[in-house]
Amino acid sequence: MTEELDLSPRTVFRVGFFFELGLVLIAAILGEVLHDEPFPFRIDWSARDLLWALLAALPPAAGALFLTSPPGRRLLPFRKIYERVKEVLGKPIQGLGLDEIILLSGAAGIGEEVLFRGVLQPALGLWLTSLVFGLLHALTPAYFILAAVMGAYLGWLQMASGNLLVPITVHWAYDVIALLILKRRFESDAAAASSPGVNGVTKEAP
């Protein structure tokens, strides 16, 4: 496996944060082109919808927990996803603070949901939008499939609720949980690599 890229946590945070929020501007332009208004969707600050969204974030979060666990990584497609993410972003993720994880996840939740579920889905439909969403997250073929399924799930939530707050909150909460899981896994991997077991055999991270 190739070495992890040498990116600083601050660089990853700043670039990621402003790029994700920049998707709102792209969404506004596409909204004018496709719908004659920049934001053709509804956001209602509903406590019921917010609670529903937090509960809806639990299934994909459980999936991320399994995918990154030792049993999950024994499955080749999941192992390739884990190793690819670790290769590209392992060190930066380890260096992110909780506040940066929350802000970066929020920017992704807002930017990507406004663009995909808020603007593109009404024009392209659920399945095509989900396919595009998957393609733009395709670190590996398996990750493309998982991202497309996640896109369809978020799109269904948007259709069921009629409130973009729901997919934004689910996306935000899921990203926070997934990044915290990855941070812990990568830290455990680094600790295991620096503490060889018996006869120099490296212990697998828990």
Image: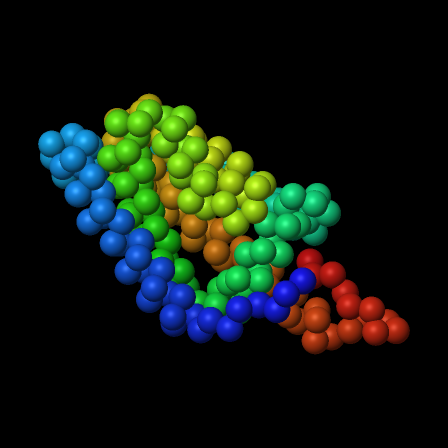
Q: Residue at x 31, y 41 (%)?
A: 113
| Outermost residue, right side | 199
Quadrant for residue 28, please give it: top left
Q: Is residue 33 above or below residue 197?
A: above
| Outermost residue, front side | 33
Q: Residue at x 20, y 39 (%)?
A: 30
Q: Nearer the viewer, residue 103 or 52?
A: 103
- Residue 126 placement (x, y as % from top left): 36, 26
Q: Quadrant of the N terminus?
A: bottom right
Q: Is residue 65 above or below residue 30?
A: below
Q: Quadrant of the C terminus?
A: bottom right
Q: Is residue 33 above or below residue 13?
A: above
Specify whether residue 5 is in view.
yes
Q: Nearer the viewer, residue 104 or 25?
A: 25
Q: Nearer the viewer, residue 151 or 134?
A: 134
Q: Residue at x 43, y 53 (%)?
A: 176
